[in-house]
Amino acid sequence: MDGPDEPQKKISELQAMAARVRRLAIGLTQAADRERLMQHALEIETDARHLQAQAAQMPIRQQQVQQQQQQATEPQPYPADEPR
C-alpha cells in the first residue's frame, strides 16, 4: 500500500519529467518534433495536476473511512443493557 508521501513523490516526479521534456524540446530543430514534445510535457503536467487534486481529496476520504470504522467498532448495547 502507498504511504502518505507517495502521491506527493509521484507529483514531484511528474513535474520534473515535464520540465526535462520541455528542455529537450527546446533543443530540437524540427518544429514538428518540438511541438510533439511540448504537447507531451503538457500531458505530463496535466497528469500531475489530476494526481494533486486526488491527493487533496485523500485526507477527507480517509477521515470518512475512519469515522465509519469507528462507528462500526463501537460496542452495541445488549438487550439486557437497554433501559426498560
Image (spheres, rainbow, N blue to C red):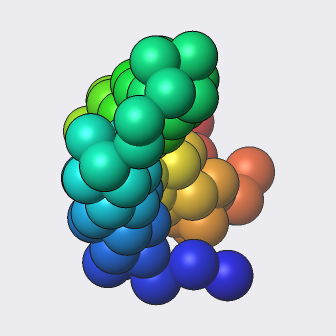
Residue positioned most to the right = 79
Residue 79 seen in the current view: yes
Viewer-proximal residue, 30 or 38? 30
Percent coordinates x, y for residue 33 in the rendering: 57, 29
Residue in the picture at 43% in, 75% down: 6
Viewer-proximal residue, 42 or 3? 42
Percent coordinates x, y for residue 66 in the rendering: 45, 57
Residue in the picture at 50% in, 27% down: 30
Relative placement, left or right, of 50 versus 59 is right
Residue in the picture at 27% in, 41% down: 26
Viewer-proximal residue, 13 or 63? 13
Percent coordinates x, y for residue 1 in the rendering: 67, 82
Q: Vertical placement of 20 versus 28: above or below?
A: below
Q: Vertical placement of 14 versus 41: above or below?
A: below
Residue 71 seen in the current view: no
Relative placement, left or right, of 13 versus 73 is left
Q: Vertical placement of 34 versus 81: above or below?
A: above
- Count of numbered labels shown in the rendering: 0
Viewer-proximal residue, 50 or 35? 35
Quadrant (top left/top right/bottom left/bottom right) for the C terminus: top right
Residue positioned most to the front = 29
Percent coordinates x, y for residue 47 in the rendering: 49, 34
